[in-house]
Image (cartoon, rainbow, N blue to C red):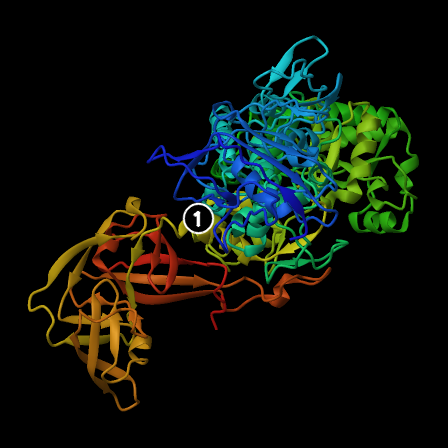
Amino acid sequence: MGFQANAVIPSRFRYEKLNNGGDQYHEKLMARPRRRRCWVKKMNGGVRRCLRLSRSRKLTFKALSVILMPSPNSRIAKVYAHVIDRIKMMDDLSLYPNIIFSTHWGLPVLSHPHPSSLENLKISLAFSIPQFILSEIGVRSFRGGDQPAYQQKAGESDGRRCSVLEGSEEVKIPPPLSVIAAAKVASLTLPPPSTVTSASDSACPPTFLFSNGLKLQGTYVLLRYIGRVANLYGQDPFESSQIDQWLEYTPVLSVGSEFENACNYIDNYLQTRTFLVGYSLSIADIAIWSGLAGTGLRWESCRKSKKFPNVVRWFNSIFDEYSEALNEVVSTYVGKKGPVKPAAAKPKGQQVVSGDNPEKGKASSKPSSEVDLPGAEIGKVCLRFAPEPSGYLHIGHSKAALLNQYFAQRYQGRLIVRFDDTNPSKESNEFVDNLLKDIDTLGIKYETITHTSDYFPQLMEMAENLICQGKAYVDDTPREQMQKERMDGIESKCRSNSVAENLKLWKEMIAGSERGLQCCVRGKLDMQDPNKSLRDPVYYRCNPVPHHRIGSKYKIYPTYDFACPFVDSVEGITHALRSSEYHDRNAQYDRIQADMGLRKVHLYEFSRLNMVYTILSKRHLRWFVENGKVDGWDDARFPTVQGIVRRGLKVEALVQFILEQGASKNLNLMEWDKLWTINKKIIDPVCPRHTAVIEEHRVPLTLTDGPKQPFVRIIPRHKKHEGAGEKATTYTNRIWVDHADAELISVNEEITLMDWGNAIVKEIEKDQNGKVTHLSGVLHLEGSVKTTKLKLTWLPDTSELVNLTLVDFDYLITKKKLEEGESFQDVLNPFTKKETAALGDSNMRNLKRGEILQLERKGYFRCDAPFVRPSKPVVLLAIPDGRQATSLK
């Protein structure tokens, strides 16, 4: 076997079966064939019988001494892997103190054990083995010969190590993997671990001694300390308690027999989640991640088996996001058998990458929002979400709102909602009210609401000051000519006007006179700058339209470019998040703020969210509303929050989708399928099931031996979710089936009627065109549903059926992405809505507006109009599931 070994098992050695004490055996160390092989093949003297380590015997070892001397080409790792697996099962090391392994190593032959533990095997052990093995086990103190001693607290199972004492010299050993990983991710420098002063100490939890003399001791104490310092310990007490639950769960991962069960539990939990707790990384994620990574080959085997796709997705996303820090930790403390960073893979039909993304064609499920804001300090960050009240909130705005909230919570800062109401021609109170409604729908938690119009007097004063300082001027150049001059870098004839002349025209603008209406205020920046946004932008313009909030008090209004830098600084905003479409205007923002002499606000840029076949311009969306192409801003075909929620999207799915995109600056064109797939995973486990039959050409099926009198059974609305409630199903001898299903049936074919049983179709009647018009058959309830080809939904032929209108939708345009300068009106989709009449089971009379359900074998739907009277159909809007084609032609 490639090694030489002597084994001596003293006569005092014994082991006992827990349920049958007193049985004594002397056996060679060996496992059952084809299972956990751990053997000593060659033995010079001593005992040659085997000591079988069996799961069924639940053994407790009392004393054992073994001496192993490996040959240069030893494969002793196989011997030790089995033993170390069982050490991973320890409950309390102090219970069995007499087992000693003394080794003389020729080579570092084991870099990482492959755990495969026995259940309830309690073993206590003191090892003199290399440090890289010690990192995987818990060890009591042991001094023997020239071998170093290791001390370890019992019950800690995440690979912690304390101190190694070699003679009189103390050697510091790193703390547990989870603590190191958390510190690396949080970019914290931990204080040095305290040293062990006595090799006879019974326990040595990781202890950190701070410069002020205070200590923190214990793995999870240290994790919580890091979590609080780095804001990784939840956003509220409930989230912190959830994190505590996961920390208590972490040791289960080190129990070999429970490992796959634990992975399965975590996989189910992560099915609709990006993180274990909340919407951002926490020490719970780091602890579980480290627990998996620390098991080495065991986790790598599960990771490659595809049994736990959600855990792998979550694990890879964290590894990918913090690859530099975690690679260093894994390579140092886990070794070659630790996790390998996954290669980026192109998703199937979920994401189209465009723009200047260097990783073109690649995508990652990682949440990219885990980035740092420049100059941010915990507790001192203030952000704002500033929508213009000229439309409803759409999915692109949702990204900005959620990212602002994310950073505010991460830095324990403030979030302000500010309405940028500087253009009365487009704004209204309707939009303000619905924006607030949408913000509430998204769960955005803000400190206060402000309006740019609150600062109109200060903004006017600032504009006048800039005119007096020669940093702005009044220009009466016609609009078209001004645009051309800006493009060509030609200075306006008004640029050299005197301050007095500019102030005179400024007064005309304030008064809203005929002369004033011809003018605007422009900043005097740099007409030759390659960045055209710096070529004397407009600061103020006249607009006689009454303001929706303050009426006709003002005739002049500041532009967004002028008002935003001013209000951001005055309101105490520390960081302004702007989408990448404003990239060229960032320099303008900084320049205007500097000319005003105001405190600088940090700008942070993120990529604008673009969706295929979707228009996000509010000006273009307004065109659809005003021209009757849709029913309103909440139309289910619209990308507005109200539109997609009305169509059946759960807010949790939207939040998860947005945060997965994160604060990346890469320009991505996203598929709707990905969002609807997330939504399906959320609604499918809980939404009730109902039955519908398409009304047109529906076919009756007469069961000649069916019930003579209708009867009713109460069955679950969802077989796997009791919370969905129950429904009443009526059974009759005449039922309805879909025409499409009837066309598939052959004479004498056995079919399954869902929620009833099998039936055999004896006769099929057709009209002159070959369409099926009637079916006759008999029940065969004793038949097996596993053997039938067709499983059909059906409805009883009763007067209690509910009239339905099933509505499906398609995209408003026919092109995935509009090219620059291309008109959306040239690619309008003529078929965007389809209504189908159907009949539904009687229980659908109780549906409420907004309730989501599944029509079995037809898809998911949201109730848009509930039952009022028999003549008015219940309206159900089809919810995409990420797979179905949406073409209505």
Instruction: Say which element carries label 1.
Output: helix
Q: Which residue is labeled 1 in the image?
A: 682
Instruction: Give coordinates of residue 434: x percent, y percent.
Output: 49, 40
Q: Quadrant of residue 286?
A: top right
Residue furthest toward the left? Answer: 708
Decide which of 38, 282 is in the foreground and name it: 38
Mark 1 closeness class: few <14, some 14–19, many ≥20 residues within 10 Å:
some
- Residue 140: % across, % down: 58, 24
Q: Is residue 662 visible?
A: no
- Asked if residue 324 lies left or right of residue 865, the reply is right
User: Hey, which quadrant is residue 171 in on the image?
Assistant: top right
Left or right of 124 in this view: 25 = left
* Rendered view: 877 above or below 640: below
Q: Is residue 819 above or below residue 78?
A: below
Q: Position of residue 327 (x, y in %)?
A: 71, 41
Is residue 255 visible in the rendered image? The answer is yes
Q: Nearer the viewer, residue 587 or 702?
A: 702
Q: Is residue 842 positioned above or below 763 on the image?
A: above
